[in-house]
Amino acid sequence: MQDIIDDICATMKDRSERGQVANYIPQLACVNPGQFGISVALPNGQVFSAGDAATLFSIQSISKLFTLTIALGKLGDAVWSRVGREPSGDPFNSIVQLEHESGKPRNPFINAGAIAIVDAIMMGHQPKETLAEILQFVRFIANDSSIGIDEKVALSELQTGDRNASLAHFMASFGRFKNPVDCVLGTYFHHCSISMSCQQLAQAGLFLVSDGINLSTGARVVSAQRARRINSLMLMCGHYDGSGEFAYRVGLPGKSGVGGGILAVAPGKASIAVWSPGLDSIGNSKLGTEALEMLVQRTGWSVFGH
Amino acid sequence: MQDIIDDICATMKDRSERGQVANYIPQLACVNPGQFGISVALPNGQVFSAGDAATLFSIQSISKLFTLTIALGKLGDAVWSRVGREPSGDPFNSIVQLEHESGKPRNPFINAGAIAIVDAIMMGHQPKETLAEILQFVRFIANDSSIGIDEKVALSELQTGDRNASLAHFMASFGRFKNPVDCVLGTYFHHCSISMSCQQLAQAGLFLVSDGINLSTGARVVSAQRARRINSLMLMCGHYDGSGEFAYRVGLPGKSGVGGGILAVAPGKASIAVWSPGLDSIGNSKLGTEALEMLVQRTGWSVFGH
Amino acid sequence: MQDIIDDICATMKDRSERGQVANYIPQLACVNPGQFGISVALPNGQVFSAGDAATLFSIQSISKLFTLTIALGKLGDAVWSRVGREPSGDPFNSIVQLEHESGKPRNPFINAGAIAIVDAIMMGHQPKETLAEILQFVRFIANDSSIGIDEKVALSELQTGDRNASLAHFMASFGRFKNPVDCVLGTYFHHCSISMSCQQLAQAGLFLVSDGINLSTGARVVSAQRARRINSLMLMCGHYDGSGEFAYRVGLPGKSGVGGGILAVAPGKASIAVWSPGLDSIGNSKLGTEALEMLVQRTGWSVFGH
Amino acid sequence: MQDIIDDICATMKDRSERGQVANYIPQLACVNPGQFGISVALPNGQVFSAGDAATLFSIQSISKLFTLTIALGKLGDAVWSRVGREPSGDPFNSIVQLEHESGKPRNPFINAGAIAIVDAIMMGHQPKETLAEILQFVRFIANDSSIGIDEKVALSELQTGDRNASLAHFMASFGRFKNPVDCVLGTYFHHCSISMSCQQLAQAGLFLVSDGINLSTGARVVSAQRARRINSLMLMCGHYDGSGEFAYRVGLPGKSGVGGGILAVAPGKASIAVWSPGLDSIGNSKLGTEALEMLVQRTGWSVFGH
């Protein structure tokens, strides 16, 4: 395994076409695009890493996976009255679908859906309390109490977050919000600004590898059925309107973030985190996707074969 | 296995809520909704069946899986210049996406995409020749030379096929067709009218279970990579705008048809065909989906667990 | 003329079908739907009134006509870099068109367009200063210094204005705003809350009757060409996606508001204000439209005949 | 008047920017773009012409005005169950709106609407009979029995008419057609291929100038109310998604065709036909629009002033 990821890392370090670093959030725009990291965590606790796997980066939309998991724990299937579970066929920040469907987002992994999920888990609490709860959960599943929020990124998002503010107010106009829009947005921007390394992120995904249990710590996080369903949502919707492409090329459930990270899950096999800041035109890490494609070719981990 | 599917069959036979039989094609509208069949084909050649598994039904859109496989064999990746590989988020017969994206269908499993695929494989031949080729392929993968077309259904579709004619002319208006629209439509309607039983259909899916080889006959149909990619397309797009729901509840690649059939693939495990004519509001077999959900719960075959 | 409007008023007072009072702004929802008023102002200064023509009501979107006129005075044709001048074919608060057209509203009379116009005229000033300027202009063209803002309505709008906040943030996300979103929204909500009577409103429209000059006071407000162009915009877009219907039935340029008022202009003939709080399904005054239809039938004032 | 149109003609002959000749219909693509003609017909029977005013050209979508008038005569207000009367905000050949609104076109002047109108007036007759009826009507209102159809253009349209075929089949799929789609399309393509000169076209519009009566012949064609309503539809929808622009710049009801012709009506004043084959990006005659803008500036004929 170490050989495989060393190979991948070497290949990625040499690539000249690295995509574009997200430029609409100033703090992300200044990240060095030359970086690449990968970590593969096995259920038995082993973690293989290469490249910049210990470097912290902004997980951005990967946080949507964690808040969905929290929401399912708190609300159960009532979550699905807030968001749907179909691919949207639209970009991550599209508002068209909301107008046609009474302000209900298609799934929890587009921005509108994730904002609605944040509203769902706040339950009248303050942003600070909700953020503490999210952080606690992420630290628990990653088994690492050092994970925190990058306040500079959060501030940067807040100042340039008109599109997300528009999505939030739009949903609120349909009476879909139970907390003040500004509180929801503040919480949303902060939880997108959690900083993690590939090593931490790969650990955090282990509960989805083994039907809800993090075998390396023995902690059950969710039921087997829920773990499988979360994986199905990641596969269907985890890469916005590039989800079909990711399924076709990589064949694993995964969730990407505009910080350049991707968390992918090979059920029964491994949890994989990759990071490279350059994005493709849809907003998914360009080298991250290529690295996962290589990894699956070498390991045969696609869920679509055997 | 026989016990499991007998249980499922007994449960389904008793259901009062059976969905609505497709009514826009007269010949389909008169099918008895009380029927239910299931067949599970294992790579070793064993086939377990229950209920009306030997009854012929119109496979309708399941044919899209076969023409896509033929097209990939003939054109390779050039297929993707004709259709995309993303979920559309729209109903099976939507034309909106075509207008916004220059007449290129999002994927090969919505009607527009399948019509484009038929045009792609005709290559200047007559409908009769193309249909012969399609039938030959289906007989080959199902290892059953008796499979044929129900001419009454084909005629019925042709007479009520204005929506599909609209899709075809729309694409043609962007210069995307290489064969006359009427020839493409005639071929399309006929290949939707192939009649198969659950037993035959389950056999036909075996090559997708074992990375491209039908292990029961030893025939390699496609490469391992191609089989996996076809499976990914089925999972992402095989149930129209109900694909996310199917992935969530069943967790297997599958393709449905408005005749009430569904072909599902559990990689490395089995090829499963179910049939019940009543459809849900999206156009997928209501009891067929429920049966597959039960089967996966009993067998643990979801691709999202281990 | 007095006979005509007395007849109309009597007819309208008897109507049982009066439409629905706007219910999304609490302060508007409690207005008595039984009211009806009409005023016809002639270029020579005569004003004919009937019914509740002296009662103050919230002009709401009719204010869009005044801010457009101010914006054209300040920016000239540069206004058209901020908004278009085509009917949108969509409801007054639609956001779909904005996403498809880079955040540029189709015209100045849908909500998004009017919000963009408010941003255009603020030019870095505070809401209070901009509102003073708008009020000054309205008082000037209506020749009535008593016109003011209903603060209760403004507050009510602000508290329930999520849809408009969404539109504003959406446009801002395309870099289209030069003032803080909250300041623009505050100004927008307040200027929608100007209270006027039919008598005042009919006076305010006189400059559009006589090619830019209010003949009753002698004041030139805009050039002849600009007056005509404003009239064309009112005819094309003044009633949202009911503009075609209004042109068909009434045949005059007009601008409606969800407070139940309509200001209509018969070039060379008269300025007409009607008010009745009940709205049709599109959001235009039901009895107001019927009253104007009757008036045009009696007077032959349609711009489409002679 | 002759001086004015001579001036306009001289200006237009010199223009270097003349737009693009319609290229999707081969027979139209080969028309010389250097041509320009204008005719102004007064109610008293006088006709002033300049430039290529006697040259025959393909009236294309201007025919929609004639079939709408025929349909209103045959069906009265029942026409509005087949098409709406709102601007669509979409291009002339858009299909998106049809999908969202159950196959009912927004207005009779977009392609889908005109095709629906042709179906409405066929009433079970053959294309040949319907075409004879349309021609008879056009000859009657233009008072010229020589007007005919250019068969080469009709054939050219039929061969490249996939987009219109798509629109027709789409509407038919909603059960909206009473005649076979092919018959409707054949009739539609032929009536678009009527050839007329500016002189003939200006005469044909006279009934809309004088409230339904062609004063030069004394023939009443439609009621006063109907004439005004047809004018309102032309103003709102006569130039597709450039209708607002035309109303803003010209301020007259008008109908354009991709052959480069425009028929405009100044109620009480004149019927004006202009022709120049080059089109703007929306599909309206570039120089034709400019010529009308000049004419209105010189004559003050805008319906929005006095």
Image (cartoon, coloured by chain):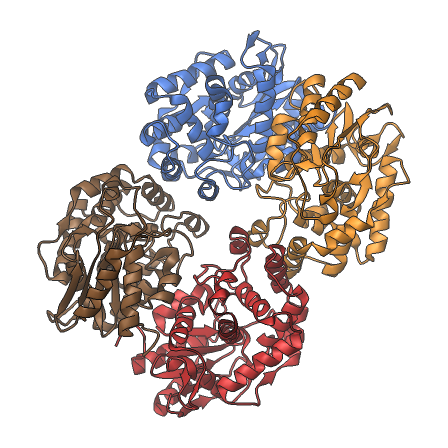
Chain colours: A orange, B blue, C red, D brown
Across and down, in percent, residue B43 comes to 62, 12
Residue beneath the point at 62% across and 38% down: B245
Residue positioned most to the left: D145
Choose top left, top right, bottom left or bottom right for residue C248: bottom left
Relative vertical location of residue B260 with respect to residue B77 in this rendering, above or below: below
Across and down, in percent, residue A21 comes to 68, 40
Quadrant where the N terminus of chain C is found in the figure: bottom left
Relative vertical location of residue A75 with respect to residue A33 in this rendering, above or below: below
Q: Which of C68 and A306 is in front in this view?
A: C68
Inspect this view and state whether residue B10 appears.
Answer: no
Q: Is residue C279 left or right of residue D279?
A: right
Across and down, in percent, residue B148 comes to 41, 18
Q: In this view, does B17 lie to the left or right of D259?
A: right
Counting labels gives: 0
Residue positioned most to the top: B218
Residue beneath the point at 26% across and 61% down: D11
Residue beneath the point at 49% across and 30% down: B108
Q: Is residue D42 left or right of residue A169?
A: left
Q: In this view, does D175 lie to the left or right of B99?
A: left
Inspect this view and state whether residue D260 appears.
Answer: yes
Q: Nearer the viewer, residue D3 or B179?
A: D3
Residue beneath the point at 39% across and 92% down: C46
Across and down, in percent, residue B67 comes to 46, 23
Quadrant where the C terminus of chain C is found in the figure: bottom left
Q: Nearer the viewer, residue C143 or C79?
A: C79
